[in-house]
Structure formats: C-alpha cells, structure tokens
Image: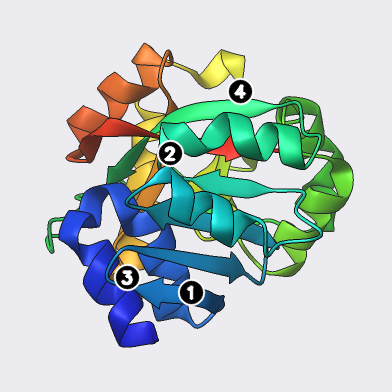
Amino acid sequence: MEDMALKYLQKNELLNIGMIFPIKRKTAKILYAKENGVLLKELKSEAYMLCVDNFNLGKDLTDLIDDGKLFNIYQEFMVDYILNKFNLSSILDCHQIAYLSKNPIVVSAELTVKKLTFEYLDIIFNHYNSYVDLDYLKRRILDGEIYGGFLKDDLCGFVGTHEEGSLGILEIFPEYRNKGYGTLLEGFMINLYLKKGFIPFGQVKIDNYKSLNLQKKMGMEISEEKIYWIF
C-alpha cells in the first residue's frame, strides 16, 4: 500500500508533500491507497489526510471514519461534507510550500540557534497561541522540535515543526524584526530537514502575503492549488 500511495501522491509532489512526508517518516497509517486516491491517518497529530480524484470516492472513504477531529484535505469539493459530517467549524485554507532544491541554505552565524526547553514554554505560548494550546507546545518541546535564536543571551525568536511534520511555529519578537532573523531561523530548519534526507515543507494561509513573499525569497516552491485544514 505504501508504494501505491506514493505513486499516486508523487504525481503532484509539491501539493501532496504533506501526505508524502508522514509516509516516508513512518508515522502514517495508510487506510486506502489505489490509483484514484489515498486516505491515511498521521499518527503523531492524529490528523486524517485525504487526497482523491472525485467526490464519491472521498465520501465513501470519509464515511469509514468515526472519530475525526482534525483533517488535512487536498480537494475543495470535500470540505463542506467533512465540516458537516463531523460537526467541525474551523477551516484554514493554505498554499503548500516545499524546498525542492538539494542545496543547503547559507545561514548567517549572527544568532546562536539551539533547542528550547520547558524554561521557555510560557514565552513561546505568549507569542504563539493563535491556533495551538499549551499542551501542544509542551509536546513539541518534549519532542525537541522547537529551536530558539539567541543574540548573546537574549532570545530573539523561535521556530519549530508541527506534529505532522511541517515547518512552522516561526515567531520573531517585535524588537528584533526586520533584521533577517526569520530567514535565518527558517534556513536553519530547512538545513536540518535536508540533513535527515527529507524535503522541507510547510503551509501558509492564502492571504498571508508577507509570509508567501518570504517563502519565495527562501527558494520555496508554492503550490497554485490550495489545501485545507479542518478542525
């Protein structure tokens, strides 16, 4: 099933990288994989991920799910059905981004970057609490997936990964903005992915033009199509 899933998803690697990554990371339970679609459950985030050729197949696969609370959907025609079936109310429509080059990012040494510990939990939460709760950030710190950028002993901002594997949790404190530190921290994370043999990827809300421009400068490819997070 893994080979069939990858064969289908890699027809549009940029758009589908968010489903390809957990398969390659071995955190995906593949529930369906044929020439017309893939349904999987990402085990770290417990998100169901669905990419299909048509609505009827998507509906049949969705009807196999009893307990869905978080979905990553790759076709707009499935959005309303999933919202209604699972009585969910929130949706984030995003562009997929991915760094498809094999060349590492040249990263300035102006900041010292290191993993953050629970000592910094409150600071992280105070600056990054729009879509995640405190327990989520605790888990990311426990997994060693949030890094801080330090100017001498002062924390300037942080970056990390989300549970399903995407780059994110990027925040530069107001007094340190417009100095290139966001680019520095994201470049650091891109290089970490490359060292592990993975394609760095993430998602950006369709109306976050500032971030989309940053991603272009970083060398990220941006999907024309949208993907949808439903919760």
Q: Is residue 149 above or below residue 141?
A: above
Q: Which mark is residue 32?
A: 1
Amino acid at the residue labelled 4: Phe
Amino acid at the residue labelled 1: Tyr
Q: Which mark is residue 173?
A: 4
Q: Secondary structure at mark 4?
A: loop
Circle 2 or circle 3, nearest the eye: 2
Q: Earlier in the sequence, mark 4 or mark 2?
A: 4
Q: Secondary structure at mark 3?
A: loop
Q: Position of residue 25 (x, y in %)?
A: 46, 78
Q: Position of residue 125 (x, y in %)?
A: 80, 35
Labels in figure, total: 4
According to the picture, the residue beneath numbered tag 2 turns out to be: 203
Given residues 109 and 36, the one toward you in this image is: 36
Q: Residue at x 81, y 28 (%)?
A: 126
Q: Earlier in the sequence, mark 3 or mark 4?
A: 4
Q: Earlier in the sequence, mark 1 or mark 4?
A: 1
